[in-house]
Image: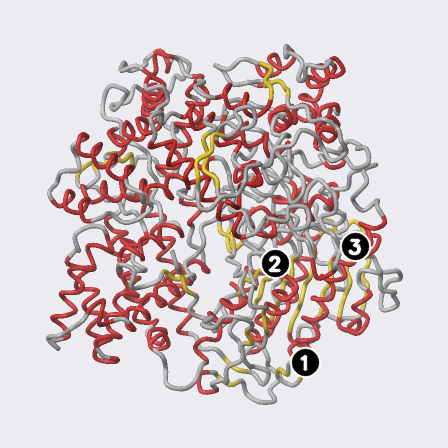
Amino acid sequence: MRQEFGARVSACVMAKRSAERVRLCGLVGVGLGLCGCYSGVDSEAAAPDAEPTATTGDVDETGDADDPDAEIPEVGCDQLRPGRAPLRRMSDVQYRNTIDDLFEGLVLASDDFPPTSRAFAFSSEPAANDVNDLAAEQILLAAEDVGDQVIASIEDIAACPSGAPTACAETFVDAFGPRAFRRPLDPAQRELLLAVFAEAEAEDGYADAIGRMVTVALQMPEFLYFIEHGVEGDDETLRLSDYEVAARLSYLYWDTMPDEELRELAQAGELQDPDILEAQARRLLADSRSAPAMTRFYREWLQIRQLRPADKDAERFEGFGPEMIASMDTQLQRFVSTSLSGDDPSLAHLLTSNTVEVDANLAAIYGVPATEGWSTLEADPEQRGGLFTLPGYLASHSYTEETSAVERGLVIRSRVLCQDIPAPPGDAADNAPPLPDNPTEADRTRALLENPNCGGCHILMNPLGMSFENYDALGAWRETYESGEAIDPQWVLASPPEGLDEQEFDGAVELGELLAGSEPVGACFVSNWLHHSYGAPAGSTEVDQCMLDELTQAFDASGQDIPALMIAMTRSDAFRYRDISTQED
Amino acid sequence: MTTRRSFLKGAGGMAVGLPFLPSIARTAPAGSDDSPQRLIVLYQPQGMIMEEWLPTGTGSDFELSPILSGLEPIREHVNILSGLDNRVPMMVNHHYGHTGTSKAMWTGLPMGYSLTPEGNLNPNAPEPENIWEMGAGGASVDQIIAQRMGAPTPYESLGLSIGRTDYLQTVASFHTAREELLGLEPDPRVAFDRLFEGFDPGTPSALQRLRAARGSVLDAVAESYASTTMRASAADRIRLEAHAEKIRELELRFSNGAGGGQGCALPQFSLPGNYDPNHSDFDDVGAIAQIENAVMALACDMTRVVSIQYTHGQDNRFPWLGHPFPFDNWEGWHGIFHIVPGGPTGREDPVVRAAMIEVMQWYASNFVHLVQRLAETPDGDGTMLDNTLVVWASEFGDGDGHGSNNIPIVTAGNLCGTVETGRHLAFEDRTTNDLLVSMLNAFGHEETSFGLPEACNGALPGFV
């Protein structure tokens, strides 16, 4: 891989069209060796490299030829394809939504619940919701907080007009338990909860006892984890119960517990039928509740972090504050949902559309007059196209005052092209190149690319990032730096993944067009979507690879229609069958 | 989506201070000198400007440096340790910058590399793949000391952070085990709530009644884990059992009561109404509040080990110092640290350098405040400071080039007469692993080596 990459780079065309930068190419080759910069398509995006035969219905026997130990699996591309899905715990967002729904708004979710770590690729990863000492205690505190509120609102939540506490507790637990655990209440669990009630009732009375029972229930694995025991199977494969499928659907598309309709379908045993699953997926997607959940995927995929008021320099960006941040968040969510529910719900559209919604807080960024409420704007197609040109995206991938070609480039390279770039070597800073006074991002990029220690890796990031230089750290359009130096957004995409040509492009709008509809970007999107959906990188086993390949192919065949991908995934075996053979998550 | 903070009911500025309920506390025998040993580790990422940190002179005859000048009032209680290298990250192929160095600092082990069965470097070990998922090399020394104490306190140890923790993995240092970070509570109000809520007297509220029933609540929860785990597949079982273990630890913890020494009182601190623990702009008030929580958690015998980490140090602006951080630099505080030769910023610039020294003096002032609070708090025959070892350090020396030679280390307290203080101990060719051995020795453990053997020469002469 390293050799192949080296060859590709040494054959590279100019990273920049201007003649002065010709020498970059030579240096890049050197730099590559020196900094050990390696970039291959990473494992989770192996699809574009896969042999075409592997994507067909035939078991790919030839694909195993170079691995003498490989056995032709019992399950293969033409047979059942269970999915790898580690046991996941509810994220902080899912917890809040679930408490809202479970108590129908009568109880407020507790702030004490452990925050989901943002240091992982997706918040669905088990490691992002790991339970250490502190988290276990935070879960307890959050459960107590909710229990306390239940006690305070006992008349609304579990009134007991009959005055017969045990009977009332049974009525409550029979209604509450199946909803909290998203499955019928197991007799042993029912007994356990009622025993908690009985003990507490004797000590502190009915209301306290209901509260204590809730405090227990909200710490139980059936509430916190997406338990998938399945209904039938063996040591390797489980078929999920209808209730487990319902939970998958609702947490994937709504980030909350199943609603009444899903519960009823599960109870009726209807959720193994792909057509019904499809209909339900479509129903959930069409509902406005899907918008925040879907947007969360795009935020995590593209590492759009939540902005805070202090993230931008207050003097330089006067209008930046909580209101503008809220507007940026709303705009992003509207952009995503409009794109997914519109006439062309394709990935290409998402990466190129210049139709945005703006409000008074964003008007200045777009250079349009402020109006009341939200209105649709056909932004200048020379300046705006696609999600990457939204202020919320651009501001998030910038520093307090300055932009960042490295960060803006890295996210495209690693998350959109699925090409890994190693962390800087330990001595990177020792070898940092000298800079002129008051350097611009262009100066920094030039310095990095011309330095043999840095250029090998930075050529993979900075040119992509530099094409965004027309947007300042807030995402507003500009054509010059403060110094008056003109911004030059014309760069070359170096070392692209298979399926994309090394090519020149002019600015972020053209970059979006170049990426839109391309095979590697589509494959990368699919692998990210699956990673998000199942909480683990897709394609880690042969069977999983079959699923990934098939979905990638289906996605391409649909013209990279995003809802079509979601539907295809929902219909796939992996959505209902779980591969439990691998111990490692 | 509304949430609520059960602790903070009112808006606006707040001063915490509830009457103390003595009946809940175990009272330590008055006037006894069998006070337990305590440990506070204070870890600050990014390093120092070492030439402005290093004292001149050695032994008890030393002159404090500009950064440490604020330590003058407490100099008789401190030891300044210079010349120790955090050598582990430099011994492996890839030291993973801040992440590998911070994890090595208190564990003495390389991150992610598999070692030989004897615990030595393994030249044939594969390069680690995902640095975020590989954890530290093992448990950190603070946690090992806490685990071995097995103290009958509600908390085996207490993790606090000063500032946000959402990206803390990048420089997280305290580990309870190889794969497990010590949880750090960033919000002093929540830490207070966890530690002291039960001390509120008067008619118990519904919440307090719930908390009083924690034993039976956790018992029932543990039972549910046991039955669910039994039905789970092998892979699921690992996760569920890990969680169940935490439940059992919680149960044990809450069956231990707090003990009140003479100095035990509810922490007193005030925070502005717009206080946000997740924003480093509030770290000045957050630091004082967390120090108060730490000192009182020890004084009330809620725990005997407190590990405190300053935030990850990426975007800090230190607004209370009045400098225009991050200046015009590559990025934030972290970027300022990474010197850019010939560039207009970084420590080469006198203005930036002066501001950086002020930041480091601010870190020093928090250390001084912590030591003074311990010295003001009676304990046994003396004060908390007499019975505590405080270790303040960073993972880097000069943080500019990820250089982990010459780590800045200051300790305070003589730990029940174990550590002689008031000295500058200048070492040569010794390592932070050696310090970790000395820390273990100070707490009565007889190790002669800790962490990676190749990076360890045994205890530091003269420290204990």
Badge 1 element? helix
Residue at the disc numbered 2:
B309
Dot 1 falls on which chain? B
Residue B355, disc: 3
Q: Residue A537, image x and y in percent?
A: 41, 33
When the figure is inspected, residue B12 is found, relative to residue B129, above or below; the finding is below
- State the residue in front, A475 or B319: A475
Please tell me how crowded label 2 is: few (under 14), some (14-19), or many (20+) other residues with Cα within 10 Å: many
Dot 3 falls on which chain? B
At 52% from the left edge and 65% from the top edge, which residue is drawn? B157
Looking at the image, tell me whether mark 1 or mark 2 is earlier in sequence order. Answer: 2
Q: Residue A69, image x and y in percent?
A: 37, 20
Q: CA distance from mark 3 to mark 1?
A: 31 Å
When the figure is inspected, residue B103 is found, relative to residue B186, above or below; the finding is above
Q: CA distance from mark 2 to mark 3?
A: 22 Å
Quadrant, the N terminus of chain A:
top right
Q: Amino acid at mark 3?
A: Ala
Looking at the image, tell me whether mark 2 or mark 3 is earlier in sequence order. Answer: 2
- Confirm whether circles 3 and 1 share one chain: yes
At 59% from the left edge and 48% from the top edge, which residue is drawn? A320
Residue at the disc numbered 1:
B376
Badge 2 element? strand
- Confirm whether circles 2 and 3 share one chain: yes
Q: Amino acid at mark 2?
A: Gln
Q: Residue A108, image x and y in percent?
A: 35, 62
Q: Amino acid at mark 1?
A: Glu
- Tell me which corner region of the image, top left, top right, bottom left or bottom right, holds residue A396: top right
Q: CA distance from mark 1 to mark 2?
A: 23 Å
Is B128 placed left or right of B334 in the picture?
Answer: left
- State the residue in front, B452 or B397: B397
Quadrant, the C terminus of chain A:
top left
Badge 3 element? helix
